[in-house]
Image: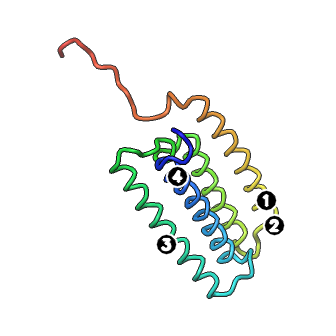
Amino acid sequence: MRPWSREWIERTIRKLIMCCSLSLLALWVGGRAGFFPFSKDALAGLQASWLVLFWIDLLLRIRARRLGEADPALDEPSPAVILTILIVLTGVAGVYAASHGGPEASSNVPYLIAVGTVLLASLGYTLAAKHRDQIGEARFKSSTKGD
């Protein structure tokens, strides 16, 4: 694929839209969590911008599939990426639950969960990337003998 071809431009635009969309989502979540001092109007604008970019990205992906130009790297993430995302989301939920616990909750627990999440995510990514050919749908050997 040569640079500046239509496929290259569309793929680059899809990647840029995805990066901007994820950045807006991170800012919106950070603002809702109280990490960034955004006003309610700014948070509403971030949420609306994310939704617009999400739908634009979705429409561009549908168009690419119809034209038969879908990028396999963009359409199906590897099992290592999916596992890492699952571990990180679970860890974030654990940190949130531990930090918003009752008054008797220890202040060290969220930090321990965060460190454990980072270690487990890196281990999970490494193992899933190393054994990616063995992860997927179950395959059973069929017997050729009649029962």
Above or below: residue 109 compared with residue 125: below
**Which label's residue is closer to the chain start, 4 or 3?**
4
Q: Earlier in the sequence, mark 4 or mark 2?
A: 4
Task: Give the secondary structure at mark 2.
Answer: loop
Q: Residues within 10 Å of mark 1 (few under 14, many from 20)?
A: few
Tag of residue 111: 1
Check residue 107 in the rendering and tell me which mark sits there, or answer none.
Answer: 2
Q: Secondary structure at mark 3?
A: helix
Q: 19 or 69: nearer the eye?
A: 69
Name the secondary structure under disc 1.
Answer: helix
Comparing 57 with 107, the one in front is: 57
Determine the image quadrant of residue 42: bottom right
The residue carrying pointer 2 sits among few (fewer than 14), some (14 to 19) or many (20 or more) residues within 10 Å by Cα, namely few
Q: Residue at x 58, y 81 (%)?
A: 45
The answer to the question of whether label 4 and label 3 lie on touching residues, with beta carbons closer than 8 A, is: no
Q: Which residue is mark 3?
A: 52
Dot 3 crowding, Cα within 10 Å, few <14, some 14–19, many 20+: few
Give the residue furthest to the left: 146
What residue is disc 4 on?
Answer: 9
Give the amino acid at mark 3: Val
- Report x, y in % for residue 28: 63, 73
Position of 27 with respect to 110 (left or right) is left
Callout 4: helix, strand or loop? helix
Q: Choose the circle earlier in sequence order: 2 or 3.
A: 3
Q: Is residue 37 left or right of residue 131?
A: right
Amino acid tagged 1: Tyr
